[in-house]
């Protein structure tokens, strides 16, 4: 999410366009899965790179963007942390552009909710990319892991995430009748458990809003306007009304199955339906397809 925030800033400053080619370095190509198996010297457009990060969480593409914007991934990580402080994210520290496990890289549900809101309101012309259901590259089609786009009415993004250390994570943005809510679930044992908890939290919140509409500001949502959805020229909108309420969840203990395994990439982890209480590898996994309260 922060990698894309800095890229959107660069687009807004006209340092890049959506058609600008991004070159894959040897360092970027060497990133662990999830990736697009890119080779050094290959290029892709900035627009394709955005989709690859949103849909695929492609680590090689994230590093390529970091190098394009910041010169090196290390310098880009410094820019990410500096931007986090500027946005008010006080408990987030970045050390890489991809989100791969790193003892020096930490964040919180509160900070991710703040970042999600800023992505939406600072860049309404680019924010619709976070609802991308799939994208094609070199003859392959890649599908989103964000099941809330299909499961919960009004969801318009934004991002899933998984590592063994963190578990299954999800930041969701939902707009209904001009009311905007952001939810964050971190540390799920399975993708299904994570999604179910997000649906429960969001449904509960909108139930309260339905009973008492004054709980939330209702108004025009900038990225829902026709101008924003064309993702054309940058604009700098004012933040409307009070911040969207944050719904976050304490992280449960990571599934023993995943905790004792070697690092599992996000594609593999998201591709199986499992019980949240798994204690050993299930014999017949079925592929789906190839914090605290505030």
Image: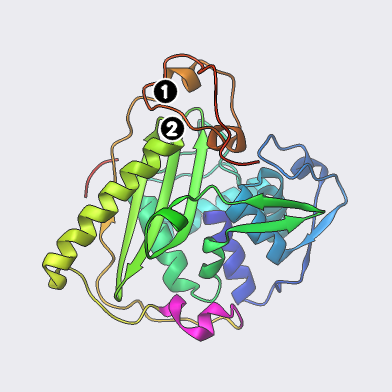
Contact? badges 1 and 2 (CB < 8 Å): yes
x then y, percent, for residue 2: 52, 55
Q: Is residue 55 magenta?
A: no
Out of 91 and 164, give the one closest to the viewer: 164
Q: How is the image coloured?
A: rainbow
Out of 235 and 290, give the one closest to the viewer: 290
Answer above or below: position of 162 versus 214: above
- Residue receiving disc 1: 255
Q: Residues within 10 Å of mark 2 (few under 14, many from 20)?
A: many
Give the magenta range.
Answer: 222-232
Out of 64 and 162, give the one closest to the viewer: 162
Q: Is residue 72 visible?
A: no
Q: Is residue 154 visible?
A: yes
Residue at 41% over, 43% down: 107
Q: Residues within 10 Å of mark 1 (few under 14, many from 20)?
A: many
Q: Main secondary structure of the magenta part?
A: helix
Mark 1 or 2, nearer chain start: 2
| Label total for image | 2
Q: Is residue 230 magenta?
A: yes
Q: Secondary structure at mark 2?
A: loop
Q: Is residue 288 left or right of residue 175?
A: right
x then y, percent, for residue 199: 32, 49
Find residue 101 and report its image quarter: top right
Which residue, as the protein is rendered here, is positioned at the far left?
A: 212
Q: Secondary structure at mark 1?
A: loop
- Residue receiving disc 2: 190
């Amino acid at each position: 999410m922060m990698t894309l925030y800095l890229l959107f800033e660069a687009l807004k400053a006209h340092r890049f366009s959506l058609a600008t080619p991004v070159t894959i370095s040897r360092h970027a190509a060497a990133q662990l899965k999830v990736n697009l198996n890119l080779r050094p010297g290959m290029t892709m457009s900035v627009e394709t790179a955005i989709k690859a990060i949103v849909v695929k969480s492609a680590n090689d593409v994230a590093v390529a963007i970091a190098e394009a914007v910041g010169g090196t991934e290390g310098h880009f990580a410094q820019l990410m942390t500096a931007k986090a402080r500027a946005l008010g994210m006080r408990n987030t520290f970045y050390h890489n552009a991809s989100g791969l496990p790193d003892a020096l890289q930490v964040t919180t549900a509160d900070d991710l909710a703040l970042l999600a809101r800023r992505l939406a309101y600072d860049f309404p012309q680019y924010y619709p990319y976070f609802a991308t259901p799939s994208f094609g590259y070199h003859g392959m089609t890649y599908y989103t892991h964000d099941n809330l786009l299909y499961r919960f009415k009004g969801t318009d993004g934004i991002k899933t995430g998984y590592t063994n250390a963190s578990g299954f994570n999800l930041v969701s943005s939902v707009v209904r009748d001009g009311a905007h809510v952001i939810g964050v679930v971190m540390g799920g044992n399975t993708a299904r458990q994570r999604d179910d908890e997000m649906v429960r939290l969001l449904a509960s919140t909108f139930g309260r809003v339905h009973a008492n509409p004054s709980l939330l500001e209702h108004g025009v949502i900038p990225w829902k306007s026709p101008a924003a959805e064309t993702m054309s020229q940058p604009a700098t909108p004012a933040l409307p009304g009070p911040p969207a309420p944050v719904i976050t969840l304490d992280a449960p203990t990571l599934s023993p199955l995943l905790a004792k395994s070697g690092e599992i990439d996000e594609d593999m982890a998201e591709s199986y339906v499992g019980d949240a209480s798994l204690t050993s590898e299930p014999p017949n996994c079925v592929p789906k397809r190839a914090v605290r309260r505030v």
